[in-house]
Image (cartoon, helix red, strand yellow):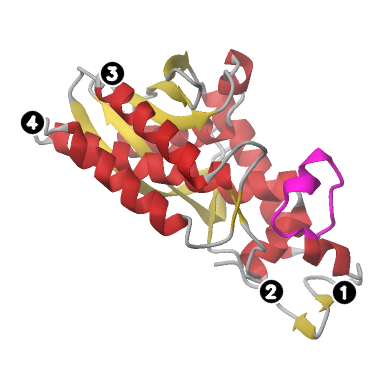
Amino acid sequence: MLEYISVSQINAYIGCSLKYKFKYIDKLSPAFTPSALAFGSSVHAAIEWMHKLLMTGNRDDVLKALSIFDADWYASCQGDIRFKSKESQKSLKQIGLKMLKFYDEQLPESKIVAVEQSFTVPIVDHSTGETLDTSLYGIIDLVLENHLIVDFKTAAKALLAVDVDSSLQMTAYSYAYNYKTGQIPSLRIDALYKTKEPKIDRIPTTRTEKDYVKLFNLAKAVIFAIEAGVFYPISSWRCNDCEFKKYCWLWNGKVTGKGADNVEYSNTRRTSANPQVV
């Protein structure tokens, strides 16, 4: 039985169930880390520190946040980072420093209630009361006063309102907050763009109990498929930049019974008769 699942895992399964298997069940090492993922993580670490300091009523010099980003980015780049055309460790470092200096001038004025708030909640159908055996877990970037949840994104191009309105991640945050507090929160994505001149978009959105029901049904279907051992590749434009592409090419596609698979890789044979997801 799958004990826990996150929105990232649900989205990963929907995007490519075989990639989900490689990452979360087989726990294979990715061939590389996309630069956008590493960069976003380093920026996030610095912003998290800024918010935690602000929550205590302090506002230290931005130089500390810049040093946190610099150290995190340097450590990330010791691994195998795949940069895009015209990107480099140095160029992204300079962009990151500019973004954080800019964000320091945009810090929220509202009272901060929580930073990096983790949750683990049952997955309940609001229309029937049915509860899954698997729980939903995640971490909310920022909770402000008046029940406002904020999620941060670093992006190269503008986010569309339709993308924010359909974000499963924001639905999950709203659902978890509602489960914990009984309140349906306001939602906002703050998109910080890694452009030549930094820019931030604050995009509001809302969710209702109908969205919670949709989340339940989607999670139920994905969990059922995972526990049944349904994993197959999805060929798309994402394949070119997939860090598990080499494993996909070596996958023989053999499935032997419910919940079982038999996958061969070059020089390595992995057999999982009862795959577990952690």
Pinpoint residue 90: horizontal percent, then vertical percent. 46, 43
The segment highlighted magenta reads: 230-245
Closer to the camera in the image, 269 or 69: 69
Mark 1–mark 4 CB contact (< 8 Å): no
Q: Which one is closest to the eye, mark 2 or mark 1?
A: 2
**Cα–Cα gap, marks 2 and 1:** 12 Å
The answer to which quarter of the image holds residue 167 is: top right
The answer to which quarter of the image holds residue 110 is: top left
Secondary structure of the residue carrying numbered label 4: loop
Other-residue count near label 3 (Cα within 10 Å), few / some / many at <14 / 14–19 / ≥20: few
Q: Which residue is mark 3?
A: 106
Residue under the point 39% across and 39% down: 43
**Residue 174 visible in the picture:** no
Residue under the point 23% across and 36% down: 50
Q: Which residue is mark 4?
A: 57
Residue 257 marker: 1
In the displayed image of the protein, which residue is found farthest to the left?
Answer: 57
Mark 4–mark 2 CB contact (< 8 Å): no
Q: Between disc 1 and disc 4, whose residue precedes?
A: 4
**Cα–Cα gap, marks 3 and 4:** 16 Å
Q: Which residue is mark 2?
A: 275
Q: Which one is closest to the eye, mark 2 or mark 3?
A: 3
Pinpoint residue 129: horizontal percent, then vertical percent. 54, 40
**Cα–Cα gap, marks 2 and 3:** 46 Å
